[in-house]
């Protein structure tokens, strides 16, 4: 019976939805990444803002199209303001991408569609984008859905999805998809149905941009086109080597098998029939982003399903020498990872049970290579990345510990005192974590009124607070970092949570009675 379930795409999607969905229950994550901006913008829509014209601090915000904000707001409308409601749409998009991966692999007559589907979800990249309020998972969702529609000959549905995809990050991905489609099937150019569908997709895709241009043309051109797109062409974020290196790291824990599959003659033979499709899906976008100056690993995440299909076609009956080499390499990687994980556990960053679980999943992963068990290979990969997600939750619990304790003990309205409208402000993420809106205060007078009404104000570590009488303050100790978690520093120096060298202190102040 389990074998028949394994061949059912809905069962695979259920495994993914359950595995990641469980981690959303009571989840707390460190305040990192662009999602801080997205959640703050979504919060303003949720609080009665304009669904067509997103705002941040009350001003139009066109750095990104609105689809991600809409998904978050819908989650909040159903489940209330929470991280669960914010992240569940991404988990659903990941599960949908898994379903599309299965169907594409099946349509292409690949030998292991279930393996390809589950491996799509079983990477660090999928864990990152599938459990946070970011846009990359939606790009993959619409891209896979569009290609699946093409394979089934539903060209109108294809460009309907492509048009909606333009609302996720911009028209670039739809344009690259169209060039890729014509590379794969140039005969589409002679079909009236293609042109009618394409024009419909263009109309849908440009619909939002046209709507906001009526009243906010200057802001749209300034923010979305000049700053977010053209501006990035003059901003180098890394090298091509770093771009591809980060992408292959995002395929952990099965990154090495991509190279093995590419070199294995039996795998190449199975791919030969569909090689033009795989190239069409991959090459145009991969080349474009490789030479685009703003090189960040998020741009290559769309290649993950193709890499999963490549590995799913791998002949696991490796020669003894290659199997030993693979086992040694992975054993060394996992030993290093285990050292890092247990080191963090020893210094109070994560629970020891999480490290033990990672060790068990790693052992199962290595065992699956030895006994060539594809199902165990995929499931243990999923276990590993889900446990990495649990580690992030552990660290997030420390990050928010003082704030949540204060909120639980005092139960009063909260506000940030913020003199300037910095887009990286955290009020959206904090609101989702505490499950209630956090107010933004921009001057002393509004802060005095908020305190007098019975609220508490969060002060950042670089802000001075007037020494009013009858005030009580609690500390909120946080890491001295704005973006990435400082793994290297913590491991190299063995720092524990609370070490002054890596901590900054916010204050939460209110009027005492």
Image (spheres, rainbow, N blue to C red):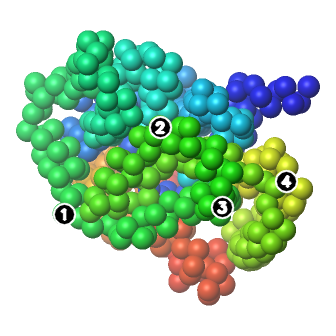
Q: Pick whichever of labels 1 and 4 is earlier in the sequence.
A: 1
Q: Which residue is mark 4?
A: 372
Q: Which residue is mark 2?
A: 277
| Local secondary structure at mark 4 | loop
Tag 4 and tag 3, C-beta contact below 8 Å: no
Q: Earlier in the sequence, mark 1 or mark 3?
A: 1
Q: Nearer the viewer, mark 1 or mark 4?
A: 4
Circle nearer the N terminus (1, 2): 1
Q: x%, y% of residue 417? A: 34, 55
Q: Return the disc, 4 or 3, that comes first in the chain's sequence.
A: 3
Residue drawn at x 31%, y 49% is 441
In the picture, the disc for residue 234 is 1
Q: Nearer the viewer, residue 322 or 287?
A: 322
- The image position of residue 110, as x and y in percent, is 66, 35
Q: Which residue is mark 3?
A: 260
In the rendered image, the vertical position of residue 490 relative to residue 239, given as above or below? below
Out of 223 and 396, give the one closest to the viewer. 223
In terms of sequence position, does the residue under pointer 2 or pointer 3 come before the other?
3
Please tell me how crowded label 1 is: few (under 14), some (14-19), or many (20+) other residues with Cα within 10 Å: few
């Amino acid at each position: 019976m389990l074998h028949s379930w394994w061949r059912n795409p809905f069962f695979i999607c259920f495994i993914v939805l359950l595995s990641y969905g469980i981690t959303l229950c009571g989840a707390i994550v460190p305040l990192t990444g662009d999602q801080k901006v997205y959640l703050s913008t979504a919060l303003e829509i949720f609080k009665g803002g304009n669904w067509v014209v997103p705002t941040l601090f009350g001003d139009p915000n066109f750095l990104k199209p609105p689809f991600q904000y809409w998904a978050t707001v819908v989650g909040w409308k159903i489940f209330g303001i929470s991280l669960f409601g914010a992240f569940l749409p991404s988990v659903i998009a990941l599960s949908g991408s898994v379903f599309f991966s299965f169907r594409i692999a099946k349509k292409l007559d690949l030998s292991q569609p279930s393996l390809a589907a589950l491996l799509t979800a079983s990477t660090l990249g999928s864990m990152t984008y599938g459990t946070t309020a970011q846009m990359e998972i939606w790009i993959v969702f619409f891209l896979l859905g569009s290609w699946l529609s093409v394979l089934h000959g539903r060209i109108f549905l294809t460009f309907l999805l492509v048009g909606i995809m333009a609302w996720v990050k911009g028209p670039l991905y739809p344009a690259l998809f169209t060039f890729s489609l014509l590379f794969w099937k140039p005969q589409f150019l002679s079909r009236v149905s293609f042109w009618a569908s394409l024009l419909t997709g263009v109309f849908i895709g440009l619909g939002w941009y046209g709507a906001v241009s009526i009243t906010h043309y200057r802001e749209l051109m300034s923010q979305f086109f000049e700053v977010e797109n053209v501006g990035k062409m003059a901003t180098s974020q890394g090298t091509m080597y770093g771009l591809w290196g980060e992408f292959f790291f995002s395929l952990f824990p099965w990154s090495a098998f991509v190279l093995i599959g590419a070199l294995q003659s039996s795998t190449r033979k199975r791919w030969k029939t569909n090689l033009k499709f795989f190239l069409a899906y991959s090459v145009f976008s991969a080349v474009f982003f490789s030479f685009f100056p703003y090189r960040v690993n998020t741009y290559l995440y769309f290649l993950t399903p193709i890499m999963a299909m490549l590995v799913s076609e791998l002949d696991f009956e490796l020669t003894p020498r290659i199997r030993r080499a693979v086992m040694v390499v992975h054993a060394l990687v996992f030993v290093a990872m285990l050292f890092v994980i247990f080191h963090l556990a020893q210094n109070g960053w994560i629970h020891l049970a999480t490290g033990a679980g990672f060790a068990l999943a790693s052992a199962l992963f290595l065992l699956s290579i030895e006994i060539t068990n594809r199902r165990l290979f995929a499931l243990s990969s999923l276990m590993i990345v889900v446990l990495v997600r649990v580690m992030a939750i552990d660290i997030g619990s420390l990050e928010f510990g003082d704030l949540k304790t204060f909120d639980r003990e005092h139960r009063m309205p909260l506000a940030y005192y913020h003199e300037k409208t910095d887009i990286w402000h955290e009020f959206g993420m904090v609101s989702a974590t505490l499950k209630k809106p956090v107010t933004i205060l921009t001057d002393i007078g509004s802060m005095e009124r908020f305190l007098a009404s019975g609220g508490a104000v969060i002060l950042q570590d670089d802000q001075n607070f007037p020494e009013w009488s009858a005030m009580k303050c609690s500390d909120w100790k946080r890491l001295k970092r704005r973006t990435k978690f400082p793994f290297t520093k913590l491991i190299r120096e063995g720092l524990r949570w609370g070490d002054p060298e890596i901590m900054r202190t916010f204050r939460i102040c209110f009027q005492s009675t």
